[in-house]
């Protein structure tokens, strides 16, 4: 029985690792089913929750209320306010700036997450919102 649980956990974690689209629990479950149809939805929920608690997987709270999950951390997330798409924005400059800022402080940053909100390229054309220049 322990082998099965280890195998199930491995499959679920691998699906999250391989995903490039910040999957929901339903999307994780769909991909897991393609690999091993014996893995149930409750098993996926339970293991994803454990991965989040163990800080192996990052939970992204979205405006729509449907949580998404990401294996990779230390980058910026951008959420489209219209379609809900989540986009990764790698930012080495921000990482360097944070390292310099906190170098001489007592805090020690191990990971970070920053969520930007706006409109993706596809939705921007239909938006009346003003853009913010950074």
Image: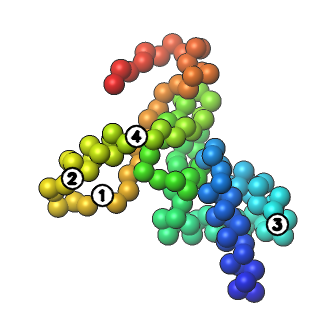
Tell me which residue sits at (68%, 78%) in the image: 6
Q: Quick check: 26 left or right of 37?
A: left
Tell me which residue sits at (17%, 61%) in the image: 106
Tell me which residue sits at (43%, 15%) in the image: 130
Question: How far separated are the C-alphas under marks 3 and 1?
Answer: 38 Å
Q: Quick check: 121 left or right of 34?
A: left
Question: How far separated are the C-alphas under marks 2 and 3?
Answer: 45 Å
For the residues labelled 2 and 1, say whether their Cβ atoms are less than 8 Å apart. Answer: yes
Q: Would you say residue 45 is visible in this rendering?
A: no
Which quadrant of the figure has residue 37?
bottom right
Q: Quadrant of the C terminus?
A: top left
Q: Would you say residue 17 is visible in this rendering?
A: yes
Residue at mark 1: 109
Above or below, 112 against 97 in this view is: below
Residue at mark 4: 91
Frontmost of labels 2 and 4 is 4
- Return the residue nearer the eye: 74 or 129: 74
For the residues labelled 3 and 1, say whether their Cβ atoms are less than 8 Å apart. Answer: no
Which of marks 1 and 3 precedes in the sequence?
3
Above or below, 54 against 23 in this view is: below
């Amino acid at each position: 029985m322990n082998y099965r649980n280890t195998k199930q956990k491995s499959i679920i974690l691998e699906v999250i690792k391989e995903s490039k689209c910040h999957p929901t629990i339903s999307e994780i479950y769909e991909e897991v089913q393609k690999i091993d149809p014996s893995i149930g939805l409750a098993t996926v929920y339970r293991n994803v929750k454990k991965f989040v608690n163990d800080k192996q997987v990052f939970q992204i709270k979205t405006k729509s209320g449907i949580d998404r999950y990401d294996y990779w951390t230390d980058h910026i997330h951008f959420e489209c306010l219209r379609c809900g798409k989540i986009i990764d924005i790698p930012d080495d400059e921000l990482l360097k700036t944070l390292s310099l800022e906190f170098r001489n402080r007592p805090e020690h940053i191990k990971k970070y997450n920053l969520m930007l909100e706006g409109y993706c390229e596809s939705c921007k054309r239909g938006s009346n919102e003003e853009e913010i220049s950074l």
